Amino acid sequence: MIYCKHKRKGMENTRFVAAAVAAISILYSGCGPNDFNYGKVKNIVEGSPVRLDAEYVTLTQDQLNCGVQEELWDAPVSTGRRGMARLTQKGRDLKFSDDVSIGELRNPFVQIRGDINLVVNEINSDRDGPEQNTKLVEMKVGANIQNTCFQNPLPIMGVRKGNFTQDYPPILLFHYYNSWQFEKFQH
């Protein structure tokens, strides 16, 4: 009887230790570089303004026309198949940083620069990045520009074979430094 009592006590201790180890494993499995997920990516990107340095966004024809009416840029001037609309100070104040290009690609586009709020529209895929504890995420993401011409976030263009393109979404680099952080748009 004493032997069974000690054996039962030992089994209870073993179960307790096993349960404690399992609980700690579950608790820590949500921390560290292995906790990367799309919800976290969306929260990081949308959580605070992101520093953009010379990214391009696409415009619709209506947004281009509205920008002319709102004096964000001058009326487009055509030089053959290509055209441009010269950016005004009012447009620069909205963090546009270069003249609007027209005709080079399917839709007009313009460069933006500065701390800008982004919106994630769709996350397509992710893969390991170029260094340890990095991830590359392909996603459709837009820049929120506070003006009546831009009721929806402006789509940020991706880069393929070294050129900006409207056909592919951008790839964003995330790095783990005690928590996942957005590092930059990958070019």
Image (cartoon, helix red, strand yellow):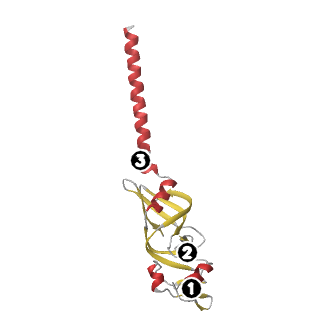
Question: Which mark sits nearer the N-terminus, 2 or 1?
Answer: 1
Q: Nearer the viewer, mark 2 or mark 3?
A: 2
Residue 19 visible in the shown view: yes
Judged from this view, the residue extending furthest toward the front is: 148
Q: CA distance from mark 2 to mark 3?
A: 38 Å
The kind of residue on which mark 2 rests is Phe
Q: Position of residue 74 (x, y in %)?
A: 53, 89
State the separation of the CA atoms marked 2 and 1: 13 Å
Residue at the spot of label 2? 150
Residue 124, above or below 1: below
Q: Is 174 left, or right, of 109 in this rendering?
A: left
Q: Which residue is mark 3?
A: 31
Q: Amino acid at mark 1?
A: Gln
Within-10-Å neighbours for mark 1: few <14, some 14–19, many 20+ = few
Q: Which residue is mark 1?
A: 69
Residue 148: x %, y % from top left: 54, 76
Q: Is residue 67 above or below residue 152?
A: below
